[in-house]
Amino acid sequence: MSIVTVQLGQCGNQIGYEVFDTICRDLHNTQGFCCKRENEVYQASCKEHFFNEEKSGVPIARALLIDMEPKVISQTLLKAAHSGRWKYGQHSHFCQKQGSGNNWAYGYSVHGPKHEESIMNLIQKEVEKYDSLRGFSTIMSMAGGTGSGLGAFLTQNLRDAYPNSFIINQIIWPYGTGEVIVQNYNSVLTLSHLYRSSDALLVHENDVVHKICAKLMNIKQISFRDVNQVIAHQLGSVFQPTYSPEDSCQYRRNPLGDLMASLVPHPEFKMLGLRNIPQMSENSLAYTTFAWTGLLKHLRQMLISNAKMEEGGFKDPALYTSWLQPSDAFSEWRTHRAFNKYEKLAALVSNSQFLLKPLDTIIGKAWNMFASKAYVHQYTKFGIEEEDFLDSFTVLEQVVASYCNL
Amino acid sequence: MEEGVVNEILQGPLKDIFDSKQLITNVSGSGNNWAVGYKVFGSQYQDQIVEKLRQTAEHCDCLQCFFIIHSMGGGTGSGLGTFILNVLEDEFPEVYRFVTSVFPSGEDDVITSPYNSVLAMKELNEHADCVLPIENESLFDIVSKINQMVTSGKPGTTVKPESLVTLNEGGIKKKLQEKPFDTMNNIVGNLLLNLTSSARFEGSLNMDLNEITMNLVPFPQLHYLVSSLTPLCTLADVNIPPRRLDQMFSDAFSKDHQLIQADPKHSLYLACALLVRGNVQISDLRRNIERLKSSLHFVSWNQEGWKTSLCSVPPVGHSHSLLALANNTCIKPTFIELKKRFTRLYKKKAHLHHYLQVDGMEESCFTEAVSSLSSLIESYNELDVTKGLPVHDPLRLNIVI
């Protein structure tokens, strides 16, 4: 029943902190809009998934912080401890002094093998604390060096060491106009490697989240903290306890596993996206009322916004590919308890073509750069040769073609 | 290789920072002769240098990079400096070598500076990971501009004294000179501070020094970066509307703020990095990139080639600052000019005997050096030719399902 979160690199650690903070705040939320007993069951279920109980009463997050340079991890540990509501385990982190230099090859071929034993030992120690481990959730960015390169290496290792546990990778898709110049190379290499070892890739696009902050939440000067909080809110709304299908008084025991079982019917299609409504600034919350029909209609619109479709609700077979029945393809998870100050909230996790365009764009840009061999020497220096690049491109073109054919 | 400058530093206000074990001096100087610096003093001091480097490196948990700071036109900085570059590559092959080189200007007082510079360029081409060229002329222009701003007396333009990028409280008191070298050198000091700020302080998007080479050096030979610093000073007026912030970004691309005589806006960008310090958020950064990118020319395979970093701690006296590093073909004229001045001297074999009489120096050293420079210029030419041409995306892989 437990999920171990592995936070990788600066991005992974910054977001991971926000996720646990959001979950913890939701846990202690007094406006649950449900009865007391319900609230208690909800809280117990949530704690079981994400936190360890400690003697002092402060819950310890079931997470591991990994980075190749120390600044971000020390900040994250401090922030958590200062909050007073929760904290990270004392020995749950691993860091070095050097950093990965935004170089996927360095993260994968140098840091990976060098620190493999220490990191796997750390994971082993954490896993031993639980009665039953359900799976791993890694948080990483695709653009940098540690999250992407070391993350890909680690995912492979996790798959080998824990073949019966689920692995879902939360991937942060970088802004289109650069945070990092070689981000397209790093992204292509990461995605192709993860596709082989991971069970599902849940994608969060920086551009999309940025727009949410700007348009829906009306934030004037958007900082990375704002972006991370939105992502954390979206993730929290998916991972928090919901009723199991058999018994609507019991909470799901294995949310991660069930999620992947229903969303990844075929190993060729692993890219998942997340849409969440409503999103609004705190000030507007007090003045807004919610209705389920409105919310669900909006969500469906978001799902199919690229296609011209008739009204039909989520059970419309036209939404789904021909080799799946709508009843298999669509499942609804619910809970009465409110989440994070929103009285009603709906989240949609989908495996669909909406990621096709961003993926295609990234492959195109990376291929363009590769054709002129720019920056390739930085990768060959650490053992990633041109053939490895070509392999990665092939894997991803395959994925694009498969999704196109749906 | 002469004692005057080092002695002055040891008597100045910063004397306690430098360990006497870290100093190597000689009496005679290199006579503005690259060959003396490289061949004579190089071999003479090699062991001592390696020893002291090892001792200092042993104190580090994790050595990431070396900074070499020198001029190209003289003898010691140029000759012995590039010799040390070679030593660093042999002894510490995995540690990055960043070189801050002061290039000679047009009216330079050292006659043999073209020889020294071209001989040093060959070494920089082959052994440096990244070079930040600086020109005295640009520094001088910036200093004059600041003086103008400070003394203009226009209403609303009083400048905060501690914010001057040329501020020099810890420096050596010198008599008034023709060229205010201390103030000019401070600008370079600030450049290095801003470069390392993200490694020293926290921020929401960190950038280490190894990320600079990774992102800004697409091909091993093209590792020369044009730098610019803004703002040069802060006005005492506390209200800083976003327009002032946006002005900072625009200034970074104007040729008046570059530290060499170059105009990046009208040449081709291979890559660009923006290191922002202070209270600037990702949305400000993105807004400015969107605004500016249409007026800049990027190479076809790197149309969105921006590397960004956000550091929360601003420099002293400012609320925010920006360092822009560009790998841009605007540096080509500097190299072409250097080659021209070299050829003018070399054709007449002027002053050549000073070099050839040094053990180990032959004419082939000169020909090899100038051909290395020529091939570098040629690489930039090939890129410039592609500027403005229509972009054809290469064919993608075809997958059979």
Image (cartoon, coloured by chain):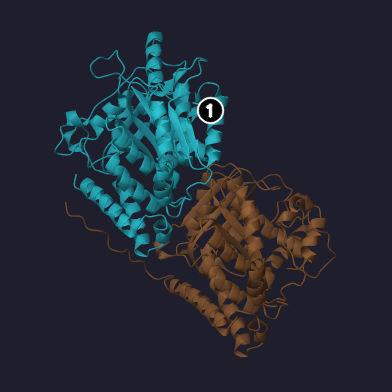
Compare residues A250 and A294 and report the one nearer the observer. A250
Colour of chain A, in one word, is: cyan
Give the side of residue B367 with respect to residue B300, left or right.
Answer: right
Q: Chain of mark 1?
A: A
State whether residue A126 is above or below residue A363: above
Which residue in the protein does label 1 denote? A80
Give the residue drawn at x 50%, y 22%: A86
Extreme-bottom residue of the structure = B348
Extreme-right residue of the structure = B175
The answer to whether residue A117 of the structure is visible from this angle is yes
The image position of residue A188, as x and y in percent, is 34, 50
Give the side of residue B302 with respect to residue A309, left or right.
Answer: right
Give the residue drawn at x 74%, y 48%: B236
The image position of residue A13, as x and y in percent, is 47, 36
Quarter of the image with the N terminus of chain A in it: top left
Give the tally of numbered discs.
1
Give the residue drawn at x 37%, y 40%: A154
Quarter of the image with the C terminus of chain A in it: top left
**Amino acid under disc 1:** Ala
Compare residues B265 and A152 and report the one nearer the observer. A152
The image position of residue B352, as x and y in percent, is 64, 85
Question: Which element is circle 1 on?
Answer: helix
Mark 1 packing: few (<14 Cα in 10 Å), some, or many (20+)?
some
The answer to whether residue A34 of the structure is visible from this angle is no
Question: Any idea which chain is the brown one in this picture?
Answer: B
Q: Answer with the quarter of the image where residue A386 lies.
A: bottom left
Give the residue drawn at x 48%, y 20%: A59
Q: Answer with the quarter of the image where residue B250 lies.
A: bottom right
State whether residue B159 is above or below residue B36: above
